[in-house]
Image (cartoon, rainbow, N blue to C red):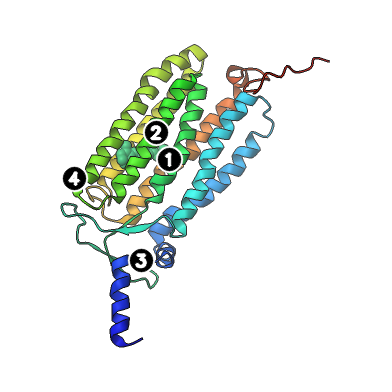
């Protein structure tokens, strides 16, 4: 390639943003950002093994459904963090004017180039759309709630995450980023209403109010934490500009909201199978009548 050709290629590359390989190397060579991701892959994997071990003797189908639901959160987490680690679900986003990081550049660690914009770990928001419904399913089942309320909570929960993803990736206007954020928060209020008003009543009826109240407080406080963290992190007001610190915040929340939450749920289910149970034939499909011979 001629000198001018090389220069053109470099400029074009810069305009297109980093390659996946550069992002992969960046995560690998930035200790703070890297550790916030790798630690969670390990924890998610270990928690899956631990939960399977703890629940190995469980036979009641409804109790098992609750445990499987919590295990799904860890399973999605393995995939989610692998997406981040591989560079697949990370990007460098050029913030619109008005944003504190408008015009900022990012030097990629590990020999990558310098690019206009700040790093977004947008894969987090995408995969929360697949993991958090299982947190709500477990909560709704523990509360003994009906299908309508469980599905309503899950629909708005998926809405939170997808509009949160939209907030993270919108570059057309600063205002539009916060408009998405506002829509996301409105959906969040629906979930909070179900958690704080609807399900506690159901849980009282089901006799699970003690554990439900603990889980409810843990969930509402932590989920509110994610919301505030987005607002102050590098993609929001950028009071915290550092991508590694922003990422560690979510990773720390994840550790409690996923694995801590799941442990509480599984411990409760194991010790209270009779309260949780709905009989041997719970969830059976079709109208086949089991033989009684
Ligand atoms: C965003 C930004 C937009 C506004 C709101 C948010 C809320 C996120 C929440 C995330 C919870 C994640 C969990 C993950 C564990 O697997 C998307 C940050 C309201 C509540 C519990």
Residue at the (37%, 71%) spot, across then down? 112
Tell which of 150 and 220 is nearer to you.
150
Q: Secondary structure at mark 3?
A: loop
Q: Quadrant of the C terminus?
A: top right
Q: Quadrant of residue 69?
A: top right
Question: On the image, numbered disc 3 is attached to which residue?
Answer: 18
| N-term-proximal mark, 2 vs 1 | 1
Mark 2 Cβ and ligand 1 under 8 Å apart: no
Q: Secondary structure at mark 4?
A: helix
Residue 175 marker: 4
Q: Looking at the picture, does residue 201 appear above or below residue 151? A: above
| N-term-proximal mark, 1 vs 3 | 3
57 horizontally vs 137: left or right: right
How many residues crowd around disc 1 within 10 Å: few (fewer than 14), some, or many (20 or more)?
A: many
Q: Position of residue 212 (x, y in %)?
A: 46, 22
Q: Are marks 1 and 4 in contact (CB under 8 Å)?
A: no
- Spatial separation of the CA atoms under disc 2 and disc 3: 31 Å
Q: Secondary structure at mark 1?
A: helix
In which of the image's four quarters is ligand 1 placed? top left
Residue, far bottom: 2
Residue 261 marker: none
Question: On the image, numbered disc 2 is attached to which residue?
Answer: 157
Q: Position of residue 96 (x, y in %)?
A: 20, 54
Q: Looking at the picture, does residue 213 appear above or below residue 44? A: above
């Amino acid at each position: 390639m001629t000198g001018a050709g090389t220069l053109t290629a470099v400029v074009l590359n810069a305009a297109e943003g980093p390659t996946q390989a550069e992002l992969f190397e960046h995560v690998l060579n930035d200790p703070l950002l890297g550790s916030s991701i790798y630690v969670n892959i390990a924890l998610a994997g270990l928690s899956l093994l631990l939960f399977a071990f703890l629940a190995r003797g469980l036979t009641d189908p409804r109790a098992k459904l609750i445990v499987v639901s919590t295990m799904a959160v860890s399973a999605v987490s393995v995939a989610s963090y692998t997406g981040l680690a591989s560079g697949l679900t990370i990007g460098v986003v050029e913030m619109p004017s008005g944003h504190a990081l408008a015009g900022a550049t990012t030097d990629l660690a590990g020999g990558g180039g310098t690019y206009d914009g700040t790093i977004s770990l947008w894969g987090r928001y995408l995969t929360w759309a697949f993991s958090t419904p299982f947190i709500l399913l477990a909560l709704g089942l523990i509360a003994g709630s009906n299908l309508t309320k469980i599905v309503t909570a899950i629909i708005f929960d998926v809405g939170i995450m997808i509009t949160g993803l939209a907030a993270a990736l919108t570059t057309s206007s600063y205002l539009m980023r916060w408009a998405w954020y506002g829509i996301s928060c409105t959906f969040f209020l629906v979930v909070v209403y179900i958690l704080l008003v609807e399900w506690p009543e159901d849980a009282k009826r089901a006799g699970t109010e003690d554990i439900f109240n603990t889980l409810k407080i843990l969930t509402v406080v932590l989920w509110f934490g994610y919301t505030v963290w987005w607002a102050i992190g590098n993609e929001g007001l950028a009071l915290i500009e550092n991508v590694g610190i922003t990422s560690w915040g979510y990773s720390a929340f994840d550790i409690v909201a996923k694995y801590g939450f799941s442990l509480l749920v599984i411990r409760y289910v194991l010790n209270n199978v009779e309260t949780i149970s709905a009989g041997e034939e719970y969830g059976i499909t079709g109208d086949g009548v089991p033989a009684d011979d």
